Each structure stands twice: as structure tokens, then as C-alpha cells.
Image (spheres, helix red, strand yellow):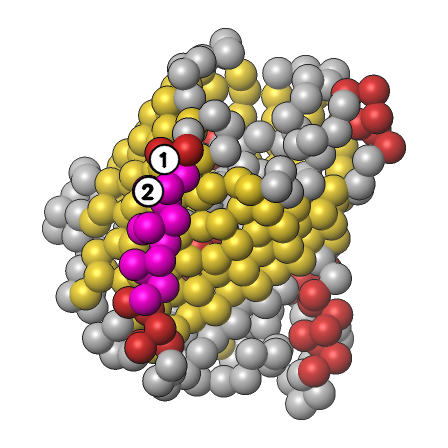
Amino acid sequence: MKHGARIFWIWLGVVLTAAVPASAQVVWTQSVLALLPQEAKAVALGGALTSVRGDLDVVLYNPAALETYRYPQRFRISPVFNPAALAVFGASRDERPVWRGADASERVALLGTVFPGLLLRWKALDVALNLGLDLGQPEFDERPALEFNGFPAAHGHLAAARIRLAKEVTVGASVFYAQERDGESVRRGIGASYGVLLQSREGLRFGVAYVALPAPAREVLRRRDRFASGTVNLGMSYTASRRWLVSLDVRNISEEAKRPLREFHLGTQLVVYRHLALRGGAYRDNDRGETVWSGGFALFDRNRFVSPDRFLRQRSFVVEYGVRVFPTERQAVHAFSVLLRF
């Protein structure tokens, strides 16, 4: 473990050294603060999440990797609260949310900026509901970090469930509803994805996910998160001593004709002091023709270090930050989120 940690610190130093010259001359920055709460982890780990367990932050990548609670419980339901959304609304005086004139999906999306999710466990079944995914921009535009930018004109809702067939095998599926408004016209679509996660006692995991996206979300997720609809993604990860994680994703392996073409995403994470995680990642962006570097951190408890007898009385929190650096264009994308789970 000491040897692995030493390698991680050396690698992280190289990444930061390479990223500083680019980030020091940033042309624009984009914050997904509050409107896409699971994005910070994906940004920091280079998007290599197909075989990494999590809750709201992994359902888009592989619903079989959903893990609502670490300790076994027969039944538990928890709402997720995003206090950072209130700061975004307060800072966006010119483009605040409009309740009147919004349809049912847009109103749910507005509520989802403050309460982005609901987690449920019942026996061997885990369920996650992610509301108000921001689908407003296919590319990151130049704008202040705290700005409302007209959301929820384009948004989505994601529901996922996974069932544990055995300690080593889980299967999951998700339904993705997306909606986009252009004046008086509204475009809607639904996509369904499914996946499998295999894990060994030695910390090695394999994930396979078929991703099908609704039409209003395809262009945004292709450019921003490197997803191609109707393709298969593979993932492999290894966890050493419950602290050091290394993950690798191979994207879009089934249809080379669908852009983006096949890509490799690499991520790594080291948990230090039990509640602090340092992250890094990289991937080759075939659209831009360059290697994109990333890094970040997370401060959390998420009920992972609480004894089972105190579980029901313990609240969870996570503070996450991720930055994605495009060296050739000297651009950076920042993602920050604060989530509370009750």
C-alpha cells in the first residue's frame, strides 16, 4: 500500500505540473455548481465510472454500480438535498426560475435543483431517482460561475434500480427522460440503459453497460460526458486496502461509426484520513484531438464510517470538486457540488 500511495503522489504531481501552465491562462471557465451534482466526481476521475460503485454519481454510467448504503439494511429511504442551488438562484438575479408557465416536467426539474435525488433500499434492491439533470448546453460557454443560464429549458430525469443477485454479481437498469423547449415547441424523448457489475473479494471489479440516450440529451452528453447512444462501455477497477482506487473505461466499443469514436478513460483515487479523497484522471478526446487531464478532491462521510447501530441517526454529506483541463486550447472546466443525505 505504501508503494502504491507513493506512485499515486508522484503521478498526481506530474498531472498538476502539466496542468498549471494551461489553467494559469484560462480562456473561460464553466461551473456546473448545483445543476449537475454528480458531475464533480466524473470530472475528477476522467469519467472512468463504469465499474466504480456510487449513488447519484454513477447511475448514468452503469446502473448496476448503484450502491445506496454500505451497511446491509432491510429498508431505508433518504432524500438528497443540494444547498448550493440556493446560492446559484441568489446570484442569478436576471434569470431566476419561472414557475408560472412551466409544465410538470420543468417544475419537477426546478425542485430537482434543490432536491436532486431520492435513494431507497429494500432488501436486495437499490433504487435511485435523479431529478433535474441540466442539459442546457452541448458545449461549455463563457459565463460566470454562479449563473442560472435559463435552466430548466433543457433538462432530464433519471431513475435507476439494481438488484444484488449474489455478493459478486449485480444487475441494473435505468430510464432516462429528457425534454427540450424551443419557444412554444417542446421536444421529448426516453432512453433505457442497463448494465452488469462483477466484483471479487480481492477488490477487482468489471462493469459492462449498454447506454441508450433520449434524443434531446444525445448532443449534450456526447460533447460534455463523451457518451454515444446505442453503444456498449466496458470498465475495470481495482481497490487496494480500501483506500486506493484505479479505474479504466473503454467507451463506445460497439459502434465505431457513431461519434465519439472509441475512447479510453483513466481515473484514480486515494482516500486519506478516512474522510478525504484525492482524485485524478485523463482521457483522449477524439473530437478535440487531444488528451484531457483532470483532478479534484472529495470531503465526505456518506455513512461509510458509521457503525450499523448508529446508521439511522447519522446524516451524510459530501463536498466534491473536479477540474478538467484542455491543454491545447488552454481551457478549464470546473465542477463543484455540496450534497446532504438524510
Residue 35 occupies which quadrant of the picture? bottom right
Q: Which residue is drawn at 69% across and 31% down?
A: 305
Q: Place residue 250 in its image quadrant.
A: top left
Q: Which residue is drawn at 51% across and 64% down?
A: 335
Query: Can the viewer see residue 80 in this picture?
Result: no
Q: What quarter of the picture does the C terminus occupy?
A: top right
Q: How far apart in space, not on screen, are marks 1 and 2 (Cα)? A: 5 Å
Element at label 1:
helix
In contact (CB < 8 Å): disc 1 and disc 2:
yes
Work out whether residue 14 or residue 109 is closer to the camera in this orientation and state it: 14
Q: Which residue is identified by label 2?
A: 7
Q: Residue 206, percent across and down?
A: 34, 25
Where is 64 relative to 108, above or below? above
Q: How crowded is mark 1: few (under 14 residues within 10 Å), some or many (20 or more)?
A: few
Check the image and report above or below for 52 versus 26: above
Q: Is residue 256 left or right of residue 58?
A: left
Which mark identifies residue 4? 1
